[in-house]
Amino acid sequence: GSDIRYIRREIPQWIYRNYSGLSFEILTLYGLSLIFFISPAFMKNVQRNKGGAEDVRRSKKALKTAMRALNKTQGDIFSHASRIQYRYLKDRFLLSTDNLDPLTAESLLANSIPDGELKELIHMLKICDTGQYAPGKKAEKKSLITDVKSLLKRIDAHV
């Protein structure tokens, strides 16, 4: 045996003296670290593109979703029609929220919808708000759903 205080002077057998290249283990380690370094940026880019595609899909099927929801009338017809219209506007024009009022909707959509359809949309939203909160406006209740459907179809055709 050797003493603890004894210092070896020979080169261990596991170290090759004349080996000038990089070993496979070192190359593998550097390769994996490079992959781990680059992968978060790559995944972030993939997720960003995926999110954009989701918005486009939602925008394209906004009319279909609105028509399906308008066929399922429940509760107060005015609040139902108003909620469907605002949700359609949010999905179709990629707005940040569907909690709007007619004036905000008009200012946000002034450059996106032709003036005639925009005025009719604002009028329809005001009718829904009036029917929701004011008594005595039940006269427009019969044709409200068909009017909203035709208006949304015309808006979707222009966009």
Image: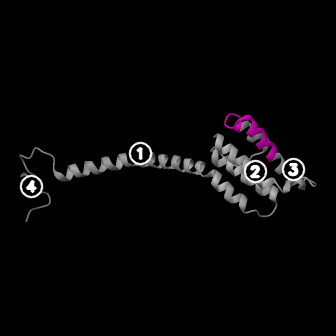
Magenta residues, start to end: 109-124
Q: Is residue 31 left or right of residue 96?
A: left
Q: Please, what secondary structure does the residue beneath circle 2 have?
A: helix
Residue identified by numbered label 3: 130
Q: Nearer the viewer, mark 1 or mark 4?
A: 1
113 relative to 27, above or below? above
- First in sequence: mark 3 vs mark 2: 3
Q: Quadrant of the N terminus?
A: bottom left
Of 131 and 17, which appears nearest the observer?
131
* Residue shown at 68% from the left, 56% from the top: 67
- Furthest toward the bottom, the residue is 1
- First in sequence: mark 3 vs mark 1: 1
The amino acid at mark 2 is Val
- Do the CB atoms of the residues marked 4 and 2 lie less than 8 Å apart? no
Quarter of image, res 96 = top right
Q: What whole-number distance in Å separates the C-alpha atoms at marks 3 and 1?
A: 51 Å
- First in sequence: mark 1 vs mark 4: 4
Q: What whole-number distance in Å separates the C-alpha atoms at marks 4 and 3?
A: 91 Å
- Furthest toward the right, the residue is 136
Where residue 5 appears, as percent x and y from the top left, is 14, 57
The amino acid at mark 1 is Ala
Residue identified by numbered label 4: 12
Q: What whole-number distance in Å separates the C-alpha atoms at marks 1 and 4?
A: 43 Å
Name the colouring of the figure. one colour
Residue identified by numbered label 2: 148
Q: Nearer the viewer, mark 3 or mark 2?
A: 2
Residue identified by numbered label 1: 41
Assess whether residue 112 is covered by the magenta stretch.
yes
